[in-house]
Amino acid sequence: MSWGTELWDQFDNLDKHTQWGIDFLERYAKFVKERLEIEQNYAKQLRNLVKKYWPKRSKEEEPRFTSCLSFYDILNELNDYAGQREVVAEEMGHKVYGTLIRYSQDLKTERKLHLQEGRKAQQYLDHCWKQMDNSKKKFERECKEAEKSQINFERLDNDINATKSEVEKAKAQYNLRTHTVDESKNEYAAQLQNFNAEQWKHFNNAIPHIFKNLQAMDERRTVKLGETYRTFAEAERRVIPIISKCLEGMVTAAKAVDERRDSGIVVESFKSGFEPPGDFPFEDYSQNLSRTGSEGAISSNTPKGERDGAPGPRPDPKHSISKAKNKLWLFGKKPKAPSVEDFSHLPPEQRRKRLQQKIDELNNKLQIEMDQRDALNKMKDVYEKTPPMGDPNSLQPKISETIFNMEKLRSEIHKHEAWLAEVEAKQASKDRRHSADNHHPTPQGRESPEGSYTEDAAQEQHTPHQRTGPVHPSGDPHEFDDEFDDDDPLPVIGHCKALYSFDGQNEGTLVMAEDEVLYIIEEDKGDGWTRARKQSGQEGYVPTTYVEITMEKNCKAIRQRAGLSCILSTALVFFSSPAWRLDILTVR
């Protein structure tokens, strides 16, 4: 239906209806705005929740349990889910709310234009009606005045007492009024004809055209609302597949929880490498008492191991308790120890793992620096071959810095590898002692509680207070390590001249000045470092690339002697160990 033909007389109602339509559109826009604000707040709260429970520690310190990793995966998926809620809010804000606000402004402008046009046409029609009405009233007044003049003329013309001049004057007045009536009549007829024409145009052309435009405007508003309804739903439906993947990721993370693997990680993380404490020995305080009973009664008070003639190794109870408290931490929290560079505060097994991890990390950094050095050298070659591309000298500071970083990393690697070798050597030594204890059983009645060999088995029964466990020759199990560290200085196998100065900031390195002459006491073993000694006797490692080395002619014999000295030192360590003494006892 057309508003122009059906609602030609409802201008005011259509004015109200179009205003209601725009108000409704703006109300829906406000609803969309509040809806997207809910989405934004929801996404923000989800992100804050993820941030709150996301681990604050570094990756190395994070637990590697599958339950923890799955929880972190769930947090990641939840963070992605929050991102999709933000996408929904953005789609609603840009394609729905923004579109509605702009369209509302356009509708207001268009409606105002159409209503102004309608009011202008109505005002023109009212103006024509007023002109017609004025001419009609004038014609009516003139007719009444003409009737009065006619009556006056007829009265004087029939009056015998009236003079001729009075009659002529009344006749002239009547004729003038008649002429004025004719003019008013013609004017009224013209204005009436003009008003009828304008009124026909108004209701058949102007108003239908204006109402048609208003109808089109209102229908476009309705269509736009339908489109935004659909876009509103599409913004939500478009992210459903991605949200489904996020939920599937959470389910996958839940399925990845493995209790057996977590138990294995607990063992790997807290395994100290120490042995559990041994049995407490039986201390017979009744050996000095007089025996009145049979020998069997005496033997009944003796531990089963001693009655069988094979007492076996019995550790010192004080040592066992101390070891259990300080290394196993079975019934309490592990005491916190300050973190040191060589991880010596950790148990052997954990120290070995941390050192290996640190070496791998340093090797990765060294590889990155080497790749950067190679890239800079290639770029330098290109600059040398093609000078317009750049100045090769401008790359030299960066190359020098990279080389310095490489030497620094090599120093760190060498230092950590030395610590790792020390840990592995101690572990291997302990394994050899275990192997010796398992493969060489002690003859019955031939070993005293402290591990020394005795000829008289009865001697053991008359020594009430004897130490248990292997005893170090010096009485201190760590004393030999100190003696091994303080061995004789290495022989000089050559000398070198410093090409560059080296600050030696890292532990184990040696400070040297440019053109300084140093003694070589150990060659580069492929790690980029040479061990040198100053004339003052200070020793340390220097970068091989920083020095010009001249080896002595008899350096080979010197190195052989140095190797022999190392072999003798190693032999001394082995011969001082309890395992070696156990082997000697077995041979005897």
Image: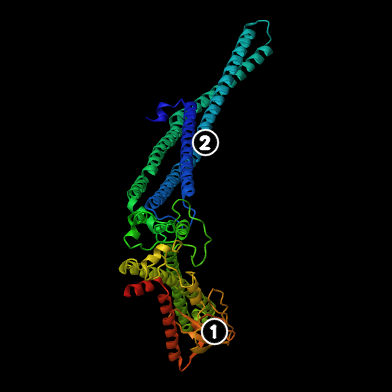
Quadrant where the image shows the C terminus: bottom left
Tag 1: amino acid:
Arg
Secondary structure at numbered mark 1: strand
Q: Which mark is residue 430?
A: none
Mark 2 — residue? 112
Mark 1 — residue? 533
The spot of residue 570 in percent (x, y) is 42, 78
The spot of residue 456 in percent (x, y) is 37, 69
Q: Please identify the quarter of the rendering in which residue 218 is found.
A: top left
Q: Earlier in the sequence, mark 2 or mark 1?
A: 2
Q: Find the residue positioned furthest to the front.
A: 292
Residue closer to the observer: 188 or 3: 3
Tell me how far mark 2 sits from mark 1, CA to CA: 98 Å
Is residue 258 at all visible to an observer of this figure?
no
User: From the viewer's perspective, is residue 315 above or below residue 170?
Assistant: below
Is residue 446 at all visible to an observer of this figure?
yes
Residue closer to the observer: 48 or 28: 48
The mark total stands at: 2
The spot of residue 93 in percent (x, y) is 46, 44
Q: Classify mark 1: residues with Cα within 10 Å, few (<14), some (14-19) or many (20+).
A: many
Tag 2: amino acid:
Lys
Q: Classify mark 2: residues with Cα within 10 Å, few (<14), some (14-19) or many (20+).
A: some
Residue closer to the observer: 155 or 422: 422
The spot of residue 288 in percent (x, y) is 44, 59
